[in-house]
Image: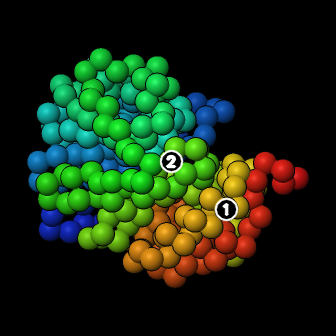
Amino acid sequence: MLTKTLWEANSHKWIICGRDPEKPNGIIDTNQYMVRTHNRLLIMDPGGIELFSAMLNSALEYASINEITDLFASHQDPDIISSLGLWDRALPKARLHAPWLWEGFIRHFGMEHTEYVRIPDEGGEIDLGAVRLTLVPAHYLHSSGNFNVYDPQLKVLMSGDIGAALEPGQPPLFVEDFTSHTKHMEAFHRRWMPSNEAKQHWIDRIRKLPIEYMAPQHGRIFKGDDVKRFLDWFENLEVGSAIR
């Protein structure tokens, strides 16, 4: 599994874990992101149960087990959080920040020691001491209770399934040619994003944020002008379950 520091400030840094060539066949490839401060580590959408050992090894490259204090689940899908039961056993004490709507479902993955921090519909923050990360509502894109994570210092948006691309092999980390990249995104967004109205609410909210990097859960990361290109492309794309 690739583990690499992407962006860094004096107070914290972002790390990506992904591009796993050893993942079992038939399992979608995912990006996991971590935020490291001087004494804490947050793991965002830590992945499926099959990734747990690789993710734990990656996290321990950057922090001791006692410093892994926070997990985040953008929504309830198993590729995001089915490893929860194993994290619950491995971490002495941690908090899971996740939508209030999905608590009764996410707990089925196993939670005996982890504290469930319910994110209200309007969003909130994850306070890591050295940095406050904003939880941005992204409801119905594609989950009815769904959130992105925004870092106002480094201007990074962890966008979950929004911006996801399904490409074969091991594609580069960053989008290099936006126009050609859209063919890897279109079918996914048409089928998995059920509401044009929700899409527009999200776009209007995101356009107000200064964003240098948009980091989705699947596929390549957008940077610079490609963030705006994505918003324009997504705005003009008809989505929903009735699309054929």
CA gap, disc 2 to disc 1? 15 Å
Q: Is residue 56 visible?
A: no
Q: Badge 2 local density, few (<14 within 10 Å), some, or many (20+)?
A: many
Q: Position of residue 155 (x, y in %)?
A: 35, 71
**Tags 2 and 1 in contact by the CB under 8 Å rule?**
no
Residue at the image point whose x is 31% and y is 37% from the top: 117
Q: Nearer the viewer, residue 24 or 213?
A: 213
Q: Nearer the viewer, residue 129 or 16?
A: 129
The quarter of the picture where the N terminus appears is: top left
Instruction: Residue type at mark 1: give it.
Output: Glu
Q: Earlier in the sequence, mark 2 or mark 1?
A: 2
Give how far across and how far down residue 111 sits, in percent.
34, 21
> Residue 73 placed where, x, y %?
42, 41
Of the residues shown, which amino acid type is indicated by label 2? Answer: Asn
Q: Which structural element holds mark 1?
A: helix
Secondary element type, mark 2: loop
Q: Is residue 207 above or below residue 109?
A: below
- Residue 136 visible: yes
Q: How is the image coloured?
A: rainbow
Residue 159 lies, with reference to residue 110, above or below; the image says below
Identify the residue at horizontal 21%, vertical 52% (top origin). 127
Of circles 2 and 1, which is in front? 1
> 179 or 236, which lies in front?
236
- The residue that mark 2 highlights is 146
Left or right? Give the position of 142 relative to 88: right
Residue 131 numbered tag:
none
Q: Residue furthest right?
A: 244
What's the residue at 49%, 69% (across, down)? 205
Residue 43 to residue 203: above or below: above
Mark 1 residue crowding within 10 angstroms, few (<14) / some (14–19) / many (20+) = few
Residue position marked by numbered label 1 in the rendering: 197
Residue 231, horizontal then vertical, whole percent: 59, 73
